[in-house]
Image (cartoon, rainbow, N blue to C red):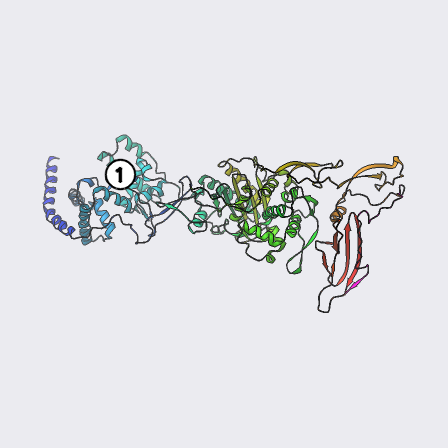
Amino acid sequence: MKRYGRVLRAAIAAAMLVLGLPFTILGIYALTLQVPDIQEPATVPGEREDSVRVVDRGGTLLREVRASDGRRAQRTSLAGFGDRVPKALLAAEDKRFYDHAGIDPIAMARAAIGSAREGRIVSGASTLSQQLARSVSGEQRTAAGKLRVMALALRLELAYDKDEILEAYLNRIEFGPNVRGAEAAAELYFGKPCADLSLAEAAAVASIPRGPTLYDPTKRPGHLVRRRDRVLDRMLEAGFATEEEVQRAKAEPLALAPRFSPASAPHFVSALLGGKLGPTVSDDGVVTTSVLAELQADATEAARRTVAELEGQGVTAASVVVLDNRTGEILAYVGSPDLGDTLRLGGNDGVLALRQPGSALKPFVYELGMEKLDLVPSSLLPDIDLSFPGPDGASFRPRNYDGRYHGPVLLRDALGSSFNVPAVHVAERLGTRAVLDRLRDLGFSSLDQAAEHYGLAIALGDGEVRLLDLANAYATLARGGVVLPVRAIPTAAPLPEGRRVLSERQAFMTTHVLADPPARVASFGDDSALDLPFEAAAKTGTSKGYRDNFAVGYTPEITVAVWVGNFDGSPMRGVSGITGAGPLFREVMLAAARHRAPTPFVEPEGFHTVEVCALSGHRPGPDCPHRRVDILPVGHDPSECTMHVHVAVDRATGERAGEDCPERFVEDRVFEAFPPLYAEWAKAVRRQTVPTTFSTRCPSRKPIDLAVSGGVRILYPRDGAKLFVDADGRLPSVRVKLSADDAVILSVDGKVSNGRVLVLSPGEHTLRAVARGSSDEVHVSVE
């Protein structure tokens, strides 16, 4: 051993003597070289040098957008790397880094002797300075190239101190395929910065530059672990770690961070970086967004479960957006359940896609009706077979989802149970243009056609909107009528005051209705997906042909909007808003409530509680059997109900009892006295209406005077009249003149008309008028 040591020392001395002259020449040559700026970005000037890290509001990585050269890169200072990674790198690549001048003659001699003894290259002698010089210059691994790299390494050592060279190395060298720098590698492979890596993780990162492909953690983890353990041994030899630390590090498994997670919000990040969600703000290569990663993961998983559960009914896609009502910030954004599912068109973004929202637009029609028509939750509205003017002169006859009409309904029930006819009735009274203007004020910029294009069907969602805009419109209701812009980037600056679009009073009444579970019972039952363990306003929507399902709702703190359907527009099979989107809405709302604890809605000033008749919405009379409590604006005091009437009848026939009828034949009963508009409906559904005839055994000396009681007669056209088409082809029309004291319901061939001009086509027709329980009809022909 002593003889071998003497030989080794002699060989090293000889090598130093032989190398001395070349080193001198290299040194002289190095002085002629231009000093490279090792702090310059490793990309083309003017392009992005580092990755942009998009993170959630708590710093959780959502996506890393690569630098302009296609690599992941994240520059940091030497101190920012912490202590372990630099030491592990020195132990792995250049333990004499702080002792040489860019070229390590001792390492070169050792490498030469070792290679000669083994007959192959067993170790390299390249220093960190040389590796950095090669990275800066791009020199090839030829003999001449290696000499130029050595000279450039000497020049770097003359121009920069050791810490600057080490920092540049850690920021510029490849630490994996398409990974530039140790910080980017630590974030990619372990999901944390270098400063937070364990000893084992630091050694693993430091192992990669020796062979970025050979030691790729994702493809060759076994190779990397063996290399890591050798680096740990070298750290022990260099005094960078203790025996106990090294053994504990070797026992640590290679636990890589997941490459993709439900919290990554890919559609959100793409929309943000594409400028679709407003300007982005980058702080040192980090874009901090408003998203909550935990809620994002919950919403994504909920969307995936919903699609899986409804797959048998033709559902392949779902989308979710959650807003913070106070700030307008996006807390969760699921464009589709799976970005990579090309078969289901998962690359589409359902949050920004244009879809027909169905009944989800109704709250804004009713809110405008409250504002312009003085409607309140207890206002009476018609849900009967009505015909409305449609585009191009055609008639429009809305139907309800359950296929039935419910007669006179209170606005509260009409909205809560999503009946169609009352919504169209209110829209007609308001005018399509007024409804459309209000929707645009709320942010539905996609409704850019003329009012005539949509017609009254706009009240039923016959227009395409974005889920994001729908969510923000409902958030406006939650804020009492104030619109705020949707925000993807949180800010510490004072929030803008917003723009008032809705009256606070009407916005609250709309919210009060949407948050009332009993109002939904007629359509959705006692225990629907919209019934939550806390107070929340909610509404569903289903487009024509079951192509789209929506469910939107809010607490004072958050708004949740979801869509269920198919990106190719194909219809689902029997999936409605309550059965498709409803369960997804419920699951996401419950998850969101864990982050923003729900509180009750606060009633603004100017309301009082009033008991009303459940049928008429008026103050209950003595004969009203069903009553409910409602809120009304102060000063809005309803009159007494007249729809429940106490009438003396013949107990045997149910007809009216005359004033001289023996008492033993008479029975007092309560009947429903509907306005004329509902007479046909009441008869069809066999409601107990006020009898209009007297019993034959109990006649009255005073026959019912239809004129006095508000009876109706058709004076023109006369029964049997013939009407003719004009010479220019125009169809005949009948203009109806009504008395001012009551409403009259008109029908042609059994179809109710909501207008006052009846256009008659050629053929036989029956015209019927109904008012105050009486009716009249005539038969006419058009030739």
* Viewer-side residue, 273 vs 428: 428
In the image, residue 25 lies in the stretch drawn in magenta: no
Query: The C terminus lies in which quarter of the figure?
Result: bottom right
At x 88%, y 39%, the residue is 659
In the image, residue 702 lies in the stretch drawn in magenta: yes
* Viewer-side residue, 66 vs 602: 602
- Left or right position of 238 against 756: left
Q: Residue furthest front?
A: 635
Q: Residues within 10 Å of mark 1 (few under 14, many from 20)?
A: many
At x 22%, y 44%, the residue is 128
* Viewer-side residue, 33 vs 445: 445
x, y percentage for residue 439? Answer: 56, 50
Look at the numbered disc 1 and give the secondary structure of its residue. helix
**Image quarter of residue 531:** top right
> Where does the magenta region start and end?
697-723
* Viewer-side residue, 366 vs 78: 366
x, y percentage for residue 318? Answer: 52, 47
In the rendered structure, which amino acid carries the disc numbered 1? Ala
x, y percentage for residue 252? Answer: 33, 35
- Left or right position of 6 against 450: left
Instruction: Report whether residue 177 is seen.
Output: no
Instruction: Name the residue tied to disc 1.
Output: 88
